[in-house]
């Protein structure tokens, strides 16, 4: 197993290669309002914030009641479309996207169907019941199936707790 960047580097010499990436959760949105900074996730919901240098998050232990209460105060804030978009992709990947070597697809695996058909779809660390309900995973698999060309491949994997990538490759055969 390896990263998408490593895969791209291995394949980039192939003629007519079109390499697309999509990761809905590779972006945060930032709003600054005085000493308050709010970060929204890909679903445009409040993820966490900072006020006066203090982290506002519900993810902290109960020893940080001020932080948790501060998060409750900002949690209901609506998303502002003027928010600054912050990419969480590898800087090398961002360079390749900016030069057009890699095309970034704005695609939500759970809610989108692609108009394009692909020879290979690689899905790592996403179709997993520790993250998503089975019904969502089945919907994502249906969307992937529809996006694959006949005889296309699905590379499905995850990184284990030991840090080792494990993957299986499937071939679309007769629908």
Image (cartoon, rainbow, N blue to C red):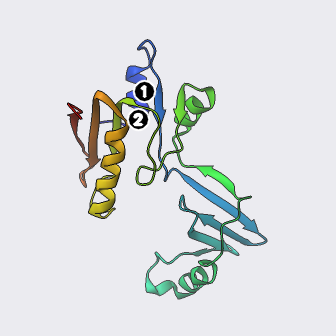
The quadrant in which the C terminus is found is top left
Q: Which mark is residue 40?
A: none
Is 16 placed above or below 45 here?
A: above
Q: Is residue 121 visible?
A: yes
Counting from the top left corner in percent of width and height, residue 66 is at 57, 86
Vertical comparison of 71 with 33: above or below: below
Give the percent coordinates (x, y) of residue 147: 38, 37
Query: Callout 1 environment at 10 Å: few (<14), some (14 to 19), or many (20+)?
Result: some
Instruction: Name the spot of residue 74 as percent of width and height, x first.
Output: 63, 78
In this rendered view, identify the residue nearer to me: 65 or 20.
20
Q: Quadrant of residue 41?
A: bottom right
In the rendered structure, the answer to whether residue 19 lies left or right of residue 34 reads left
Q: Which quarter of the rendered picture does the N terminus lie within?
A: top left
Secondary element type, mark 1: helix
**Residue placed furthest toward the top:** 15
Q: CA distance from mark 2 to mark 1?
A: 6 Å
Crowding at mark 2 (Cα within 10 Å: few <14, some 14-19, many 20+): some
- Do the residues bearing badges 2 and 1 touch, measured as CB atoms within 8 Å? yes
Q: What residue sits 27% from the left and 44% below the top?
A: 157
Q: Report the side of 174 relative to 28 (left or right).
A: left
Image mark for residue 8 = 1
Give the quarter of the image for residue 17. Answer: top left
Q: Position of residue 130 (x, y in %)?
A: 28, 63
Which residue does the numbered mark 2 point to in the structure image?
4
The answer to whether residue 45 is above or below residue 74 is above
């Amino acid at each position: 197993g390896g990263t998408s960047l490593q895969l791209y580097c291995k394949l980039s010499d192939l003629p007519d290669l079109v390499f697309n990436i999509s990761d809905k959760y590779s972006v945060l949105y930032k709003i600054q309002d005085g000493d308050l900074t709010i970060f929204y996730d890909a679903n445009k919901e409040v993820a966490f914030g900072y006020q006066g240098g203090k982290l506002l998050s519900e993810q902290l232990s109960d020893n940080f009641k001020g932080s948790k209460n501060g998060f409750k105060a900002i949690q209901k804030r609506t998303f502002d479309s003027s928010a600054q978009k912050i990419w969480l992709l590898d800087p090398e990947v961002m360079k390749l996207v900016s030069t057009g070597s890699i095309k970034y697809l704005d695609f939500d695996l759970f809610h989108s169907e692609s108009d394009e058909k692909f020879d290979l779809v690689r899905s790592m660390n996403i179709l997993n019941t520790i993250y998503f309900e089975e019904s969502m995973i089945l919907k994502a698999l249906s969307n992937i199936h529809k996006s694959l060309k006949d005889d296309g491949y699905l590379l499905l994997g995850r990184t284990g707790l030991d840090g080792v990538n494990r993957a299986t490759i499937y071939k679309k055969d007769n629908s």
